[in-house]
Image: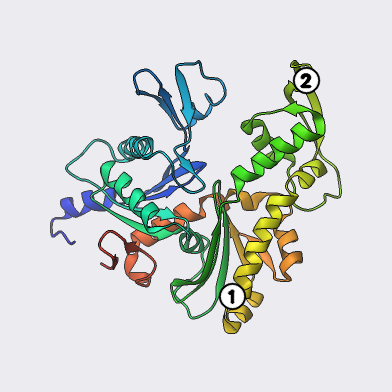
Amino acid sequence: MAFKSGFGRGMFEYSDVGIDLGTASVLVYVKGKGIVLREPSVVAIDRMSGRMVAIGDEARRMIGRTPGNIVAIRPLKDGVISNFDVTERMLRYFLRKVIGRRLFFKPRVVVCVPSGVTEVEKRSVIEASDEAGARKTYLIEEPIAAAIGAGIDIGTPYGSMVLDIGGGTADIAVISLGGAVVSESIKCAGDRFDEAIVRYIRKKHNLLIGDRTAEELKINIGTAYPRTEEVYMDVTGRNLISGLPRKVRVAGNEILEALEEPMQLVFEAVHNVLERTPPELSADISANGICMTGGGSLLYGLDRMLAEKTKVPCYVAEDAVSCVAIGTGKALEDLDSYTASAVRDYKRGEYFNL
C-alpha cells in the first residue's frame, strides 16, 4: 500500500514491526530503527484480579519468588502459544511500548514461527497479534529468518543449512531459492537443556535447584565438548535429605554429562535433515558449512561437536541470539528482495508481496 503524502508514508513505515516471539524471550524490530526491545517472555499475574503485575525483565525476576496471590508464567511453551489470553496481553504491551498508543496507525507485523508448527498454531499466533493491535500479521519461518539475519543470501540456487536453537525449539532447514527445501523442528532446545541440568544435579548431588540456577550453570560452565581446562561454579539449592540449604561445587564436565541426552536429540535431527537433502544441495552444504543461530548455539563446543558428528563444517553466526529478529527486520524492510516463499499471509493463504 503506497502513500503519496510523505508524512503518512513515514508514519506507516515507522509502524512496521518484526517480532521474534520466542519461548524464552521476545525481540522486537521496528522498521528503520532496528531491534528496539529484548525482554523475557514472562508475565506475572495477580490470581485474584487477573491483573498483570509485571511483564518481561521484572516478571522474570519474580519466578520462584512470588507470594501466593501472584504467579509468574511463561505463556509460550515449546515454541508455540500455550496461554492465548496472556500472550495477547503481553504482545499488546510490547507493541505499545515500542510504537506508542497511536491506535489509528496500527502496525503491520511479521512474526517468526518454528518451521514445524501446525495450521492451528499458526492461526493462534496471527489471532494473538491481531488482537494485540496489528493491522495485518504475516508469518515467517524461524530458520529462514535466521538465515537472512546471519547474512546468507537465501535467494540463490545454492543450498544453505541453518540450525536455530532457541528456548523451546531447535529448527533445522536446508534453504535454496528463498524457501526451505527440507526442514525439521524438534521440541528440544534451551529449556530442555535446563531441565536436564536440574535432573542431573538432583540425582548426582541430592540437591534441588531452580530453572534459573540451571540456566546460569549452562551459560557459565555448560559445554557440549570436553574442555581442556576444567571450570567450576558454586550453586546453592535445597538438600533433598535434610531439607536445608546447601552449597555444592559443580564442574563443567558434569554439565557435559547432564546435556548428553538432549544434545543427542539435536544431532539426530540434524542427521535426519542431511539424509533427506538432495545430493546437489548436500555438496553446497559440505562446502559452505552449517550456520548455527539462537542462544543455544552459544553453548561451549557445540559447533565443534556437531562438526565431528556430521563431518560437515559448522560455525556460529555473528550475534547469534538476534539473528531471527534481524532477519525478520530485513525481510520487513526490503520485501521485494526476497522470494514469495519467504514471508506469507497465512490468513488469506497468499504469499506476501508488495
Measure the alpha-carbon separation of dots 1 and 2: 49 Å
- Position of residue 216 in the picture relative to residue 28 (left or right): right
Residue appearing at x 69%, y 42% in the figure: 196
Pick out the residue farthest to the left. Answer: 4
Residue 176 sits above or below residue 264 on the image: below
Q: x%, y% of residue 315?
A: 65, 62
Residue 349 sits above or below residue 233 on the image: below
- Which of marks 2 and 1 precedes in the sequence? 2
Residue 148 sits above or below residue 18 on the image: below
Q: Which residue is mark 2?
A: 246
The disc at residue 276 is 1
Q: Decide: few, some or many residues near mark 1? Use Cα within 10 Å; few <14, some 14-19, many ≥20.
A: few
Residue appearing at x 73%, y 47% in the figure: 259
Residue 159 sits above or below residue 296 on the image: below
Q: Decide: few, some or many residues near mark 2? Use Cα within 10 Å; few <14, some 14-19, many ≥20.
A: some
Residue 319: tell me if it is visible: no
Query: Between tags 1 and 2, which lies in front?
Result: 1
Q: x%, y% of residue 57?
A: 49, 31
Q: x%, y% of residue 134?
A: 26, 47
Q: Quadrant of residue 69?
A: top left
The disc at residue 347 is none
Front residue of 262 and 164: 262
Residue type at numbered disc 1: Arg
Q: Quadrant of the N terminus?
A: bottom left
Q: Quadrant of residue 331?
A: bottom left
Front residue of 351 and 94: 351
> Tag 2's secondary structure?
strand
Residue appearing at x 45%, y 55% in the figure: 326
Residue appearing at x 22%, y 48% in the figure: 11
Residue 78: tell me if it is visible: yes
Q: Quadrant of the C terminus?
A: bottom left
